[in-house]
Image: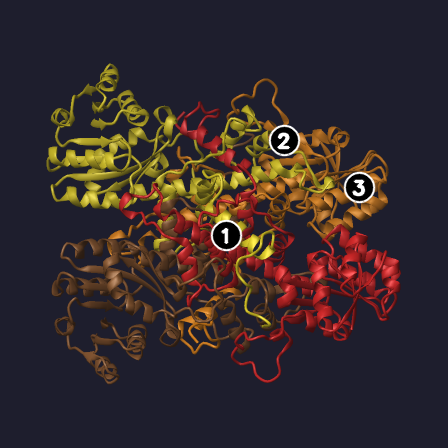
Chain colours: A orange, B yellow, C red, D brown
Amino acid sequence: MQLGMIGLGRMGGNIVRRLLKNGHTAVIYDRDPAVVAKLAEEGPTGTSDLADFVAKLEKPRTAWVMVPAGDITEAVVNELARLMEPGDTIIDGGNSFWKDDIRRAKMLAEKGIHYMDVGTSGGIWGVERGYCLMIGGDKEAFDRIEPIFATLAPGHGDIPRTAGRNGDWARSEQGYIHAGPNGAGHFVKMIHNGIEYGMMQAYAEGFDILKNAASERLPEDERIQIDITEVAEVWRRGSVVTSWLLDLSAAAFMEDGELAQYSGYVDDSGEGRWTVQAAIAEAVPAEVLTSALYTRFRSRQEHTFAEKVLSAMRKGFGGHLEPKVPPPDVDK
Amino acid sequence: MQLGMIGLGRMGGNIVRRLLKNGHTAVIYDRDPAVVAKLAEEGPTGTSDLADFVAKLEKPRTAWVMVPAGDITEAVVNELARLMEPGDTIIDGGNSFWKDDIRRAKMLAEKGIHYMDVGTSGGIWGVERGYCLMIGGDKEAFDRIEPIFATLAPGHGDIPRTAGRNGDWARSEQGYIHAGPNGAGHFVKMIHNGIEYGMMQAYAEGFDILKNAASERLPEDERIQIDITEVAEVWRRGSVVTSWLLDLSAAAFMEDGELAQYSGYVDDSGEGRWTVQAAIAEAVPAEVLTSALYTRFRSRQEHTFAEKVLSAMRKGFGGHLEPKVPPPDVDK
Amino acid sequence: MQLGMIGLGRMGGNIVRRLLKNGHTAVIYDRDPAVVAKLAEEGPTGTSDLADFVAKLEKPRTAWVMVPAGDITEAVVNELARLMEPGDTIIDGGNSFWKDDIRRAKMLAEKGIHYMDVGTSGGIWGVERGYCLMIGGDKEAFDRIEPIFATLAPGHGDIPRTAGRNGDWARSEQGYIHAGPNGAGHFVKMIHNGIEYGMMQAYAEGFDILKNAASERLPEDERIQIDITEVAEVWRRGSVVTSWLLDLSAAAFMEDGELAQYSGYVDDSGEGRWTVQAAIAEAVPAEVLTSALYTRFRSRQEHTFAEKVLSAMRKGFGGHLEPKVPPPDVDK
Amino acid sequence: MQLGMIGLGRMGGNIVRRLLKNGHTAVIYDRDPAVVAKLAEEGPTGTSDLADFVAKLEKPRTAWVMVPAGDITEAVVNELARLMEPGDTIIDGGNSFWKDDIRRAKMLAEKGIHYMDVGTSGGIWGVERGYCLMIGGDKEAFDRIEPIFATLAPGHGDIPRTAGRNGDWARSEQGYIHAGPNGAGHFVKMIHNGIEYGMMQAYAEGFDILKNAASERLPEDERIQIDITEVAEVWRRGSVVTSWLLDLSAAAFMEDGELAQYSGYVDDSGEGRWTVQAAIAEAVPAEVLTSALYTRFRSRQEHTFAEKVLSAMRKGFGGHLEPKVPPPDVDK
């Protein structure tokens, strides 16, 4: 079937390519005409602006928005809302905040336009291997567009089947799910990323302790020199902590066991923060997911103000400088 | 080659079986003679006590101790130290504390006996699939016994090779490593388990937030009902959080998405605690690994005393009962 | 000067009493006429509804709203907005969310009405000792109402003066501050409560470890029986951890060192949650304030779903029940 | 009565002064003869080595050791053990590890020598105001030396009495306790310091969030400029978070609200680490006390290795550099 794609960056462009390769067609738009022209050489129909884009789509239209989350996505969705008609569908495939999905879906529903929020995992590998898709929105639109999702997803491949699953392959086993109503797709993707932070931090701390096992802070007879490149590799083989993130770590250590090229400055995207907010709203204790986020906050500062406050208090009671207040009122 | 095995529980027995199946021979001992007799039917030489066990081993002897860590392992090693001769080797394949390894190795070295500490991962799956082995001890003993380790390990199988690795398969790619001197094997296994705790907790918190996304604590229009069984399954397919622990979760949810059979009481073994101790000794911040441990501590109590202290303070300043102390000294 | 008070609960009623005792006058309203009538006996002018309340206030009017935060405060402020006139001032003395203050202030500014958000600490002790006040809003309104604030605050009392402070007493030394524009008052109060949570948890954990120092989980020769009632008391005397919260703890232990009357179920109010949200918005790592909040979340559940997920994974790899998925793909 | 003091640094010297001022006598020793000579001018009996020191003490002797914890204290105690006689008492007033106390006490008991472990809080303020003392050891020795402890402690002063306490002042109300058998004194002091870390971190995080409330990371209309010097001061007056540590913070901010003179590098002493170890041994969750410790670990590094591991993984799946491993095995 036909899909319209807005935003032809690495993700948007590759999604189009994967669809074309599997017999679908596409109408494409990007604010950079050169990008449109270049991708159009591979087959899809290029367009010059959003009005042109909408005009060239078959009804009911399906427009996948793959632009940066936040203001840009908001602007594109609003413009599409103006241009599109009842029965059409807008898909937000970016990393939007799930409450924005609920709000937008309501606004669009008033115009008879469907909205789908699609959490998309797989990154640069997706064009070849497929994307893991977590989809929110009404069932009617989902059913109509399912062939697109099924093509984009990895399919079942040769991953061992989970015990208890028999017969036809479920959607989840093919790598995509209809997670629920609007917001559900990005909510599930948000938690996916929250867990990702936690797992990454678990490995990171473990390797840090291994790395420092020969630290001069330790008593001399308790120091152990450990080759973490070999440790990461051996854990890939039959251990309990086997994972794709471990595979990536093993590859990074293979390149350089010191990771000297990395500064240690670590960004965070919105999903980690929203995960904590969701935990708080639900009153679910989420120590590990939150600590993983805070570590990243800390990594981007030379020192926190908090640390200076600690130093100041220590000076206050330790007397390295003359303290400025009397102690608790005793013995007078 | 020949291996002596002491302790024929699930792990010890299966290790023997995997060796026999691959052309090695074994001398076996267990404090329960019936267990010895039963396994002896499959080929290995049974023995009636540790003296008999040592006598039946070819020199230089290799004795693998697979009994509960702590006092029992200690007693067996001490008894073997008395019975064995220079050039022999004792292997501790259990979950011993790595500093105990260093101590024992020193004591045995004075008698000319080698000691190896082997962290063994793979559990009930090991007999068929192989064990991930992290080995500490002197190189001489390691070299002599390597055929045993190579047989027990999974081998390279068809796991994709890490980029940058070429030519002959390294030991780590076959699933075992010589991690370093004594203590190194159990140290690496300890960190493996510490990471395991952290990863498990990351998933657990994520699924908890998903489960509570429909909680009545939330505003009605922000509740989402999510089928976590399908979420766990879809994440196995091309997402970033793919792992064996996720596979296990997916299987557990398939059986019952409510996990109603589980009380939520979660034990911890020594490795998680020792990991935190190592982090502290090295001054490495290990928030996530520590929180994962504390969650388990908390899971085993109805309420902590700490929580009662909080309640008591709240009553103190909130006035639900008459507070028992005057407030800070103001305005008098 | 004259203050109007809406909401005559423990806080609102006592604020009125403290003002009357110091020469101010008051107009009062509560949705329960009996409460109005009763307090009116002590001098203030009772009113029967908000229209009556507004009518009886001298211009420019000053109305202090002391009702539960959230919908009720919102409704009262909106009703006052309808009834009051340019130059009047509405004070929200409750525990409102600071972003609501900013929103309300903007709405009221369009009508020429001032709005002040006042964080009020001191609880049941305030009527006698005074309230610690953190005030947000425009300077003009603040200046006009300052006599009220100065009366409600504790005054400097005989608390030792901070080094470097000389001459006239600053407002802060008298127990109230103009913290900044609207939102600032409740923001500072929010952080106050966030810190309060963290401090409480620090004491709580410390006493928990002391209480369990004689635990049977410990080796027999490492158990120590400690009388925490005496410990809390002695720390009040010249130690570094002296505080009012410690005073409250000492009093609670004096009553019963086991705290047997407390269940350990611990509530949290909005401020702790908003503090974490502010930390996240600012990318400030706030491990301790967040952990203190999560502990309370945990205290209110028998078991988390997360804990059940842990148990399920452990069963998966530990083999206590038959695992439902194959292990990572090795050696086949 | 007479006390012998070994180690005449700030603490040891001031303890002697406080005793002399209150009618006791002292025999003093320090490895630096000049220090001995100087303090001897104020009255106590100087000595030239430990043998001389022991010789000049009246029997039964009381020797207070106030030298750095660890190897130095160990050496001094061992030397005293050699020189002293049955019935004598050794007091360790430093910050020793409580398990060392238990070990030493056993060793000394075999010689008939008493041992007391005394946690001493009060620092540079102690000479004037008195020391908060937490004392472990046998009751017989405690009773004999109590006059010394009573003199060193602050006494009840004019701190308000805790409700429920009547009649004679308990020892705890005078600022010293017999906490229990050997180890108990330093155990209680250890927890005191653990709590101190947690409280400090709670304030530090709170002030950090206040400081960053005007951060440019925030939406422009959600930024608030807050004067934390005034906030710290106002909280000293009738708020719930009143404490001596807050007094110290207020003084530090008064000097410089930016705390520009502090680097933010924060040391930790043994007590914080031992507190966490005790929590783990007892299986008590101690999130806040542990996080407070980890913050200090982190403050002393430019970047952790863990952070580099995170960056490396992110590069692996985000594709900013060519990843080195294939993704999970799908769709082939």
State which chain disc 3 sits on: A
**Which secondary structure lies at badge 3?**
helix
- Of badges 1 and 3, nearer the viewer stands 3
Amino acid type of the residue tagged 3 in the rendering: Lys
Secondary element under disc 1, as helix, strand or loop, is: helix
Local packing at callout 2 (Cα closer than 10 Å; few below 14, some 14-19, many 20+) is some
Residue visible at 55% across and 69% down in the picture: B329
- Left or right: D12 in relation to D83: right
From the image, which quarter does the N terminus of chain A lie in?
A: top right
Disc 1 from disc 3: Cα separation: 39 Å
Residue at the spot of label 3: A106
Picture coordinates of residue D216, whole percent (x, y):
65, 65
Quarter location, residue A5: top right
Q: Amino acid at mark 1?
A: Ser
The residue tagged with tag 2: helix, strand or loop?
loop
Residue at the spot x=33%, y=71% of the render? D152
* Residue D311, disc: 1
Q: Are marks 2 and 3 on the same chain?
A: no
Q: Is residue B294 shown above or below C100?
A: above
Question: x, y percentage for residue C273?
Answer: 62, 52
| Residue with the most extreme top position | B41
Q: Chain of mark 1?
A: D
| Chain of the residue displaying label 2 | B
Residue type at mark 2 is: Asp
Q: In this rendering, do the residues under marks 2 and 1 share a single chain?
A: no
The residue carrying pointer 1 sits among few (fewer than 14), some (14 to 19) or many (20 or more) residues within 10 Å by Cα, namely many
Say whether residue C69 is left or right of residue C241: right
The residue lying furthest to the front in this view is: D167
Question: Can residue B255 be seen?
Answer: yes
Q: Position of residue D143 (x, y in %)?
A: 26, 62
> What numbered label is drawn on residue B227?
2
